[in-house]
Image: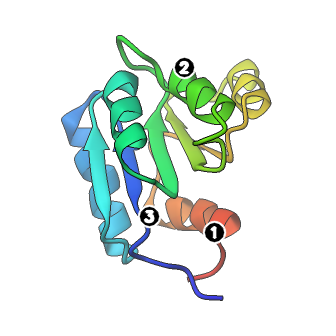
Amino acid sequence: MSVDKNMPILIVDDFKMMRRVVRNLLTQLGFANLDEAADGGEALQKIKAKSYRLVVSDWNMEPMSGIELLEKVKSSPDTKNIDFIMLTAEGKTDNIIKAKQLGVNSYIVKPFTAKVLKEKLVALIGPF
């Protein structure tokens, strides 16, 4: 089965520049159906309005953090099957464990390259 490169993906980060970087990397990898949100609250509204296959979210955001967004997404029967990749500048073991306990599918420490993002996506959705 081939990977649907038109699957809906939501990029969540409070820094517009970081959203642009993630969008550009995903575009380079061939993904085209990309939306953005500036924080967890905005992301949650978009998730309720559209069926996303994947969320790529920063951890540290205000007023709703990425970990709070992850918890809400994974605890709802309507959204629990959305794949979730957490981005963070901190590689603390406690954070990784907490995210895993809440159901994160993958974890990427910033800064990262297109190669790292592709490896995480391949592990999650299959080769492309």
Instruction: Specify few, some or many for label 3: CA neighbours under 10 Å numbering under 14, 14-19, or 20 or more.
Output: some
**What residue lies at 67% left-to-right and 29% top-to-bottom?**
75
For residue 40, the mark is none
Distance of label 3 from label 2 (alpha carbons): 26 Å
Q: Earlier in the sequence, mark 3 or mark 2?
A: 2
**What residue lies at 21% left-to-right and 40% top-to-bottom?**
17
Is residue 70 depicted above or below 124 in this figure?
A: above
Instruction: Specify few, some or many for label 1: CA neighbours under 10 Å numbering under 14, 14-19, or 20 or more.
Output: some
Is residue 13 depicted above or below 83 in this figure?
A: above
Is residue 88 depicted above or below 95 in this figure?
A: below
Amino acid beneath label 3: Ala
Which residue does the numbered mark 3 point to in the structure image?
114
Q: Is residue 101 left or right of residue 35?
A: right
Q: Is residue 106 left or right of residue 113?
A: right
Point out the frontmost of discs 3 and 1: 1
**What residue lies at 38% left-to-right and 49% top-to-bottom?**
10
Tell which of 26 and 44 is nearer to you: 44
Amino acid beneath label 1: Ile
Which residue does the numbered mark 1 point to in the structure image?
125
Image quadrant where residue 36 sits: top left
Identity of the residue furthest to the bottom in this view? 1
For residue 68, the mark is 2
Where is residue 100? Give x, y as percent: 76, 34
Q: Earlier in the sequence, mark 1 or mark 2?
A: 2
Amino acid beneath label 2: Glu
Marks 3/1 in contact by CB < 8 Å: the verdict is: no
Question: Looking at the figure, which quarter contains the C terminus?
Answer: bottom right
Q: Earlier in the sequence, mark 3 or mark 1?
A: 3
Question: Which element carries disc 1, helix, strand or loop?
Answer: helix
